Amino acid sequence: MKPVNSYDKITLGLNKALDFNHQYDCKKTYSNTGELLQLSHQQVGMSITIDYQRSFTRITLSSKFLKAKALGLITLDTFSDMYREVSKVVSISSAELEESIFQKGEVTQDVTVDSPSDAIGYLYTLAKKQMAYKIPKRCYKHGGKECSFYMKKNNLSRKYIDYLSIYDKEVEQLNPEIKANQAYLNSLSSEDRHRFQQALKGKVRFEVKFNSAHMVRHHLKLTKDVRPTFKAVLDSEVPVVANMVQKVFKDTEPNHQEQYKPKNMNQLSYYLALKENKFDLNQTREYLRTQFGDVKLSRIMKKVAEVLVSATLIPNETCSTAYQTILKLLTHQ
């Protein structure tokens, strides 16, 4: 196997105060006594902060530093490009960059489909059938078409959050309200900008966020004796995005019975409640809360979700086919 993951954003840490190259302007932070505490520098796709009190350097990068090649993302293949850009700003060796600690990031994978809005809409419909991950009450739209949604699971605390985001990359990139994206487009030549915008068409982006060292280890299956270095992360052969998508959607596909047949009165009542609310779990939850209050609601909703998974609805066949197509694209790139 070979490394399979790519990243749109990463934050790296080094237990060393690096030196900025003199030609770059830096923001300076002083203590009340006039002691220099921090130096920081920002440019499109890059932010570097040197903390002199802690003797620590934090490097935050997005794929935008790759300029016209940004859709290539941060990977083992683009490491040399990244090192070249970072070393222009600070004095750092290739080995130091490789051995820096991977603090957080966004594992990112793009797939190209005929209709991003349809694919996102079908996945959102399936996402509503599961209970493990929270999703927004409605899929976000642009121009009346589905363009994005996210799924989040807070296992224990903030550092254990599982987070999957699915969105139309073209819509997100061209959104005038996202200043960083506009700054990136303005940094390109007119020819590169046109080429980049053409390459965005049909792209659906999947992102899994690593918000802590724990989640880096969890998703990449790194044992405790392996330091989560940048090199270890780039070398990983664990397909994070495909694994996460399967984890979220595996229990949402319909069985292939012609018609759902309840086994007892409870299942029948749950099925009728779902039918009354157009098979929308969130809407059904609110409906049951108004009928019976919050007593045992969580337990009841787990049973309702089981009924929903078992019930075959005609639209689900289309949604399931879309999911299987997306999964194949994610696993065969």
Image: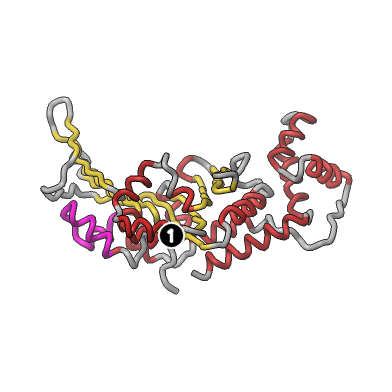
Query: What residue range appears in magenta?
Result: 80-101
Identify whether 289 is placed above or below 101. Answer: above
Viewer-side residue, 43 vs 59: 43
**Can residue 154 be seen in this snapshot?**
yes
The residue at 51%/48% (across/down) is: 163
Q: Nearer the viewer, residue 132 or 274?
A: 274
Quadrant of the rendered image containing residue 283: top right
Q: Position of residue 168 (x, y in %)?
A: 51, 52
Q: Main secondary structure of the magenta part?
A: helix
Q: How many numbered marks appear?
A: 1
Q: Give, as a three-letter code, the residue at label 1.
A: Gln
Magenta stretch holds residue 309: no
Q: Secondary structure at mark 1?
A: helix
Residue labelled with disc 1: 198
Q: Is residue 118 left or right of residue 84?
A: right
Q: Position of residue 90 (x, y in %)?
A: 18, 52
Question: Dot 1, how many residues are within 10 Å of its Cα: few (below 14), some (14-19), or many (20+)?
Answer: few
Q: Residue at x 34, y 61 (%)?
A: 69
Q: Name the residue: 62% across, 55% down.
A: 118
Residue 166 position within the rendered picture, expressed as x and y whole percent measured from the top left? 53, 51
Which is nearer the eye, 203 or 80? 203
Q: Does residue 294 appear left or right of residue 113 in this picture?
A: right
Residue 187 vs residue 112: left or right?
A: left
Picture quadrant where residue 153 is located: top right
Q: What percent of the width, then of the height, locates residue 56?
A: 23, 45
Q: Residue furthest top?
A: 32
Task: Examine the image and state in which quarter residue 274 appears.
Answer: top right
User: In this rendering, does residue 225 appear at all?
Assistant: no
| Coloring basis for residues | secondary structure
